Structure formats: structure tokens, C-alpha cells
Image: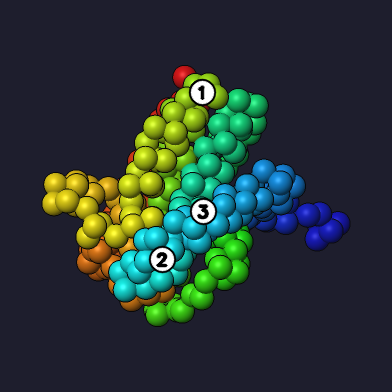
């Protein structure tokens, strides 16, 4: 009789593998973000493509004929990497700031906070979701660029590293913006008054060698200048900044933003207030 009774060991629940739980949580966040991006593709993918097309028609074709060569290359060819990177930056940022603020506004971020997921997994999941949109838009704008000009790949590894790290950096920046934002107006403050000016003055449309000395020195304070030039170097082999220093800056920025985002999540800043 006693041999038929279940033992204590048999009644114990199977051990929970934290790595699997964390991976499942991370994957769920990314898949949900991807589904959201594709579901509203008319708002997430199409507008950047239309904007890039207008830039090529107006700046590349019409104004570019008067500008002539830039950095030793046809202006449209010089412009293309900048437009691709600009699309990646703005969309990586916009996806996370809107998605995470929506989670705060809808109160379903609380479901993640009571789950067994650590803060760093939640931050990584949203950042990866932002990267998905940034890279999807980047690919779409690259296709548009190929309609207007020829893109020769000079260093593929540099291109991939630059776009991935830049996308991650601005996805994390969007996460921080969403944490501190208390209403929809504050969601748009940073993109409108900080991100857009930095992007336009970040060497997207021109080489800083054309600027006067004081403006050139001021440009070196702009982190987007380093990201755009590192990406452009991957295509054209030319850059206004040291590419090694650009990558060092990007890696440090991404690591710092990730650490800050995780620390603020642990404190519940903007969530438990």
C-alpha cells in the first residue's frame, strides 16, 4: 500500500527556469511590438518612405544639381546614408516613446511590473521593439534610395554596427522620455525641440567642412553627427569624424542609457508616482 502512495518529491512542482521565463517575456514584448508596427503600417512605415522620397526629389534632384559634388560624391549618393540614418533614429525613438507611454496610460504596464520579469528584460524588450521599427523603416528608405542613386557598400560590418547601435541608443532614449512624460504633450517635447534640431544639424544634408570654424566646432558636440558619419563611412568610405571615436561614443551612450533606464525602472520613476 505504502509503495503506491505518491512521495513528497513527486508532489513538488518542477523547477522554474528563470532564463526561459525571461526569454519568453522578452520575446513576447518584441512580438507584440512587431505586431503593433505591422498592424498600423500606414502610420509606422509609409510616412518615412514618403518623406524620404520628397527629400530625394527636392534636395537630391532639384537642389542637388546646384550643389554639385559633396565630399567627392554625387550629392544624392552623399545624401542617401544620412536620410536612411535619420529615418532609423526618429522611428526607433518614436516607437518606444509612444508604445511605453501607451502602456503607462492604459495601466497595463503594471502587469509587467508584477510579473517575474526583471526590469532589464522589460527595458531590453521595448528597446528591441524600437529597433525592429527603426530597421524596418531603414530598409524601406534604403529601397527608396536605390531608386534615386547607387549605393556602394564600402564596409558592411561598419554599416550594420552603426545602424544597430544607433537604433538601440535612440530606442532607449525614447524609453526614458516615456518614463518621465506625464501627458501626450510631453511625449512630443523631446522629439520636436531636441531630436529634430540635432538631426538636421547632424550632417545629414551636408559635410561640416562647408561650415565656418565656429559652427564646425559646435557641430562636434552633436552626437548624431558621429552616428551619421560612421554610417556614411560604411557606404562611401568618407567621414567628417574619426570612425573609432564615433563607435566609442555610440557604445558608451547606449550602455549609459540602458543602465539609467533599468535603474529608473527599479525605482518605479514615472510609473508608481
Secondary structure of the residue carrying numbered label 1: helix
Rounded to the nearest angstrom, the CA distance separating label 1 from label 2 is 37 Å
The number of callouts visible is 3
Q: Quick check: 44 left or right of 11?
A: left
From the top left corner, tell me how far across and down residue 108 is, in percent.
64, 31
Viewer-closest of 192 and 40? 192
Look at the image and tell me whether residue 180 can be seen. Answer: yes
In the rendered image, which residue does mark 2 sit on? 75
Rounded to the nearest angstrom, the CA distance separating label 3 from label 2 is 12 Å
- Mark toward the start of the polypeptide (3 vs 2): 3
Residue 245: give its label: none
Residue ID at (56%, 52%) = 54
Is label 3 or label 1 in front? Answer: 3
Secondary structure of the residue carrying numbered label 2: helix
In the rendered image, which residue does mark 1 sit on? 185
In the rendered image, which residue does mark 3 sit on? 58
From the top left corner, tell me how far across and down residue 180 is, in percent.
43, 28
Which class describes the residues within 10 Å of circle 3: few (<14), some (14-19), or many (20+)?
A: few
Amino acid at each position: 500500500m505504502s509503495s503506491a502512495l505518491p512521495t513528497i518529491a513527486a508532489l513538488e512542482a518542477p523547477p522554474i527556469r528563470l532564463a526561459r521565463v525571461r526569454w519568453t517575456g522578452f520575446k513576447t514584448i518584441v512580438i507584440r511590438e512587431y505586431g503593433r508596427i505591422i498592424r498600423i503600417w500606414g502610420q509606422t512605415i509609409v510616412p518615412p518612405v514618403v518623406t524620404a522620397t520628397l527629400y530625394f526629389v527636392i534636395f537630391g534632384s532639384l537642389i542637388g544639381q546646384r550643389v554639385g559634388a559633396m565630399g567627392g560624391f554625387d550629392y544624392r549618393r552623399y545624401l542617401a546614408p544620412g536620410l536612411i540614418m535619420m529615418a532609423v533614429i526618429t522611428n526607433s525613438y518614436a516607437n518606444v516613446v509612444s508604445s511605453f507611454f501607451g502602456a503607462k496610460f492604459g495601466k497595463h504596464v503594471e502587469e509587467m511590473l508584477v510579473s517575474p520579469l526583471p526590469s532589464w528584460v522589460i527595458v531590453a524588450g521595448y528597446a528591441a521593439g524600437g529597433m525592429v521599427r527603426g530597421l524596418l523603416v531603414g530598409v524601406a528608405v534604403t529601397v527608396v534610395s536605390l531608386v534615386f542613386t547607387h549605393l556602394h557598400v564600402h564596409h558592411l560590418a561598419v554599416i550594420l554596427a552603426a545602424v544597430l547601435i544607433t537604433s538601440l541608443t535612440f530606442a532607449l532614449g525614447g524609453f526614458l522620455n516615456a518614463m518621465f512624460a506625464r501627458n501626450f504633450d510631453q511625449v512630443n517635447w523631446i522629439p520636436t525641440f531636441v531630436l529634430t534640431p540635432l538631426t538636421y544639424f547632424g550632417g545629414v544634408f551636408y559635410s561640416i567642412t562647408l561650415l565656418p570654424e565656429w559652427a564646425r566646432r559646435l557641430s562636434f558636440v552633436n552626437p548624431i553627427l558621429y552616428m551619421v558619419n560612421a554610417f556614411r563611412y560604411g557606404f562611401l568610405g568618407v567621414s567628417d569624424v574619426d570612425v573609432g571615436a564615433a563607435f566609442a561614443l555610440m557604445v558608451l551612450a547606449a550602455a549609459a542609457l540602458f543602465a539609467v533606464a533599468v535603474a529608473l525602472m527599479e525605482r518605479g520613476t514615472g510609473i508608481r508616482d
